Image (cartoon, rainbow, N blue to C red):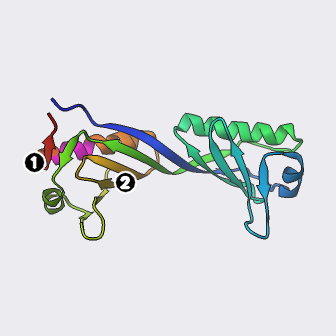
Amino acid sequence: MASKPVYRIENIVATVTLDQTLDLNAIERSVEYVEYNPDQFPGLIMRLENPKVTALIFKSGKMVVTGAKSTEELIKAVKKIIRTLRRHNIIITGRPKIQIQNIVASANLNVEVNLEKAAFLLEDNMYEPEQFPGLIHRMSQPRVVLLVFSSGKMVITGAKREEEVEEAVYRIYDKLKELGCIREEY
């Protein structure tokens, strides 16, 4: 009996909006572990060790936060960034608005996939093995893109919520099984 599909969130990219402008020069002067070189890039870079995320902070009050492995970790990171700024006398008014832009996950279906057959039977896919060894499948529900490899390994991108990752993994597994495109490992 083959084991069930497994997945892991690799990265969450989110935008955070603070409804105010920020003085990046003041932040650079007072916060020790930031990088700010406006000639190279207009944002200030803040890296956290725990949780391990990177935030690009712009003077408009917008931030891009990458590296979180869960929504919970993302929220924890944003709170830590705000606390750090406040601790260094940077006044933050109001609550940050967090919006997840993209979740990237890896998965293993724990079966071998017949990509030729899947490419023929599945809708909304692209498979050109001379160009790329995986089948690219655009799923409409949830709206994600899957890179499916013959080994059963997958990359999922485009999800906006963690639940969409799980739904996509089980949905493609069931669909491939229904179409007879998988060989179970024994």
Q: How many dots with numbers?
A: 2
- Who is closer to the viewer here, 61 or 180? 180
30, 58: nearer the viewer: 30
Q: Amino acid under label 1?
A: Gly
Quadrant in the picture for residue 87: top right
| Residue 142 visible at all | no
Q: Quadrant of residue 39?
A: bottom right
Q: What residue sits 79% from the left and 39% below the top?
A: 84
Q: Position of residue 45 (x, y in %)?
A: 72, 54
Q: Position of residue 163 (x, y in %)?
A: 40, 39
Disc ID at residue 180: 1
Which secondary structure, mark 1? loop
Residue pictured at 65% horizontal, 35% vertical: 50
Residue 113 position, x and y percent, is: 19, 49
Q: Give the residue type that dot 2 points to.
A: Arg
The nearer-to-camera label among 2 and 1 is: 1
Label 2 to label 1: alpha-carbon separation: 23 Å
- Up the image or down, 88 lies above or below 129; here it is above
Q: Is residue 157 left or right of residue 54?
A: left
Asked if residue 72 lies left or right of residue 36, the reply is left
Residue 108 forms part of the magenta stretch? no
Q: Which residue is mark 2?
A: 143
Q: Main secondary structure of the magenta part?
A: helix
Determine if residue 181 is in view. yes
User: Does residue 175 show up magenta in the picture?
Assistant: yes
Looking at the image, residue 144 sits to the left or right of residue 63; the answer is left
* Magenta highlight range: 171-176
